[in-house]
């Protein structure tokens, strides 16, 4: 028998929060639909024979509270909904970071501006850091545009984008540039044969961290 239940949720701040709760609830066997609004703080769940406590525990497990209750359960690495959401977050971060980093490295190769620099010299280090800065910048710009597309105003979107994990983005950037340097033998520039491996390494390096941050703190803004 299909029935609906309404649950009041605290801690949602954006469309990403409501989407994450919706995905987690709909991942449960017996739940056919979950209509979640971060604006009202309400979830209307259509299900067949699912205990209310099971649904509440699922919400608590991903970092939100229900009627003042918070989760005291151990951290779980097996939440497939969180892996899926963190993969999506990592994907968009990778796209944003790659635009700035690949563009800068490609310019180095095209212009020859870094040709012949001594590996480890001060100027080499300066040119090595620049792709990381540009990658972080383009990632923040892309995140801001995505959040604005999700009906967030520019000021809040920019603030949220800056508040996202720079640890994740920085490790992504560093891992991709190191991979490229292995192909170029230390010369600053873009080896086009390295690009597929750079993207794979750039995605895999921060993904577990993004899962941990999402599962533990409920930080999700896509």
Image: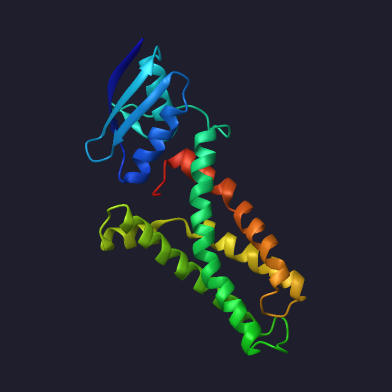
**Residue at left offset 43%, top offset 26%:** 58
**Residue at left offset 75%, top offset 75%:** 184
The residue furthest left is 40
**Which residue is more in the foreground, 56 or 44?**
44
**Residue at left offset 52%, top offset 65%:** 97
**Which residue is more in the foreground, 167 or 132?**
132
Residue 106: percent from left, percent from top: 61, 78
Vertical position of residue 203 compared to residue 14: above or below: below
Residue 152: percent from left, percent from top: 28, 55
* Residue 25 visible in the snapshot: yes
**Residue at left offset 37%, top offset 23%:** 56
Vertical position of residue 38 compared to residue 115: above or below: above
> Colour scheme of this structure image?
rainbow
Residue 47: percent from left, percent from top: 37, 18
* Residue 71 visible in the snapshot: no
Q: Quadrant of residue 188?
A: bottom right
Quadrant into which the N terminus falls? top left
Residue 48: percent from left, percent from top: 39, 14
Total numbered badges shown on the rendered structure: 0
Q: Quadrant of residue 202?
A: bottom right
């Amino acid at each position: 028998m299909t029935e609906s239940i309404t649950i009041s949720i605290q801690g949602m701040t954006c469309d990403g929060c409501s989407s994450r709760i919706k995905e987690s609830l709909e991942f449960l066997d017996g739940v056919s639909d979950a209509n979640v609004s971060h604006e009202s703080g309400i979830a209307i769940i259509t299900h067949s024979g699912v205990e209310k406590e099971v649904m509440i525990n699922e919400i608590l497990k991903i970092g939100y509270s229900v009627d003042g209750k918070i989760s005291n359960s151990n951290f779980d690495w097996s939440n497939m909904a969180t892996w899926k959401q963190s993969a999506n977050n990592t994907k968009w971060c990778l796209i944003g970071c790659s635009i700035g980093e690949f563009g800068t490295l490609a310019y180095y190769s095209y212009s020859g501006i870094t040709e012949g620099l001594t590996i480890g010299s001060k100027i080499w280090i300066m040119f090595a850091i620049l792709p990381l800065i540009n990658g972080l910048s383009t990632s923040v710009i892309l995140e801001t545009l995505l959040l604005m597309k999700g009906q967030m105003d520019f000021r809040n979107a920019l603030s949220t984008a800056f508040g996202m994990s720079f640890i994740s983005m920085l490790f992504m950037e560093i891992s991709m540039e190191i991979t490229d340097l292995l192909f170029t033998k230390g010369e600053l520039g873009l080896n086009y044969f390295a690009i597929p491996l750079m993207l794979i390494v750039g995605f895999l390096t921060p993904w577990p961290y993004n899962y941990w941050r999402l599962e533990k703190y409920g930080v999700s803004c896509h």
